Amino acid sequence: MSDRLRILYVAYPLLPASRDSCGGAEQVLCAVERLMHQRGHATIVAACAGSQAAGELLATGSEPTEADQLEQRELEHRAAIIETISQRERQGAAFDLIHDHSGSFWQVAAEFDLPVLATLHLPRQLYRADAFFQPASNVFFNCASRCQSKQFNDLPRFAGVIENGIDLERFRPNFGEREGYLLWMGRICEEKGAHLALDVAQAAQLPVILAGQVYPFSYHQRYYRREIVPRLENLGLQARHIVAPTFSQKLRLLQRARAVLIPSTVEETSSLVAMEAMACGTPVIAFRRGALAQIVVSGVTGFLVESAEEMAEAVREAAKIDRNTCRRYAEQFYADERMAGEYEQLYEKVLKNWRGRRAHELVA
């Protein structure tokens, strides 16, 4: 891309966004923003205070101290962003493009005259039923996998599919002895199936580590108390929960695990954890749900299964998966540089469409 753009990245408003965020959408945003900044674009990240950005950070408010504050934070977040959009325009430094990873900011796009690319990170069932009713004409959409895009084929101005990627330099194999535990990593909520990972560990009679946090929603917290705490207590020393692992802890956990378990109960749109595990040479055992069936090559980089019982059986076969094969597969398909290059091309496509439509409106 020859043009150097001013790009505003909009993050999920509730928690700080960084390369080491628990949530995949935050990690993808930070990766894309960092690489676009390296490519010479002027980037700004609108996010919760405490977030990280390679370019400029627009802190839209503080992380809430109580549960169920999303609606309040969204209002605060949107107001700060819209004011900044207006301010930059008055200063003669208007943004060329807004790349929205928040899951909702694009719904107020009618309030300004800029193209918005909304990357959809979730299955459709997890969005509000009316979220996609008559989106503003300056909103374009993209998905993170082909199977996800089938859920959104009715959307106007659908711009394409770009699969997520990871920083392969950060995630590398360690060819020492594995420590024999099973690993589950991510946001602790019902659809991610952390309780099922604990059941699999019990059935397989293997130690298990949960690594990840409970987001500040009361229904997530109730799930944790109802389904996770009793299982952890029942498993005793066989199970451990690491609430907020540092990156070095996360890397070691991925490198040394017998296998990474992904027993998601929804049609996953992507899985950074699966990509990171493969980059570390560790097999992934996942339910055949959504994009997981595209990311994991059964018998090659892990196993795809249909139930917790099958997952427990597949754990016994994990040692047959070759570490080097996992790593090579990640290198071939899941580099963040590939993802950034595809987004840069998509920006050009969106801007060309947008400018053409604006020129047509002016002539009319």
Image (cartoon, helix red, strand yellow):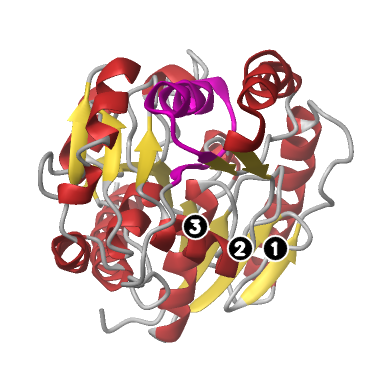
Disc 1 to disc 2, C-alpha distance:
6 Å
Bounds of the magenta span? 181-208
Indicate the position of residue 259 as horizontal and vertical percent values: 34, 46
Q: Quadrant of the N terminus?
A: bottom left
Report which residue position mark 2 lands on: 18
At a point 38% along the width and 27% down the height, the residue shown is 204
Q: Is residue 96 visible?
A: no
Labels 3 & 2 near each other (Cβ < 8 A): no
Front-most of 264 and 337?
A: 264
The residue that mark 3 highlights is 253
At a point 59% along the width and 36% down the height, the residue shown is 239
Q: Which residue is mark 1?
A: 51
Look at the numbered discs 3 and 1 and tell me whether their residues touch, using CB distance below 8 Å.
Answer: no
Give the amino acid type for the residue marked by disc 1 in the picture: Ser
Taking 32 as reference, is 128 above or below it?
above
Say which residue appears at 52% left-offset and 18% top-offset: 128
* Circle 1 Cα neighbour tier, 10 Å, few/some/many (<14 / 14–19 / ≥20): many
The answer to whether marks 1 and 2 mark residues whose Cβ atoms lie closer than 8 Å is yes
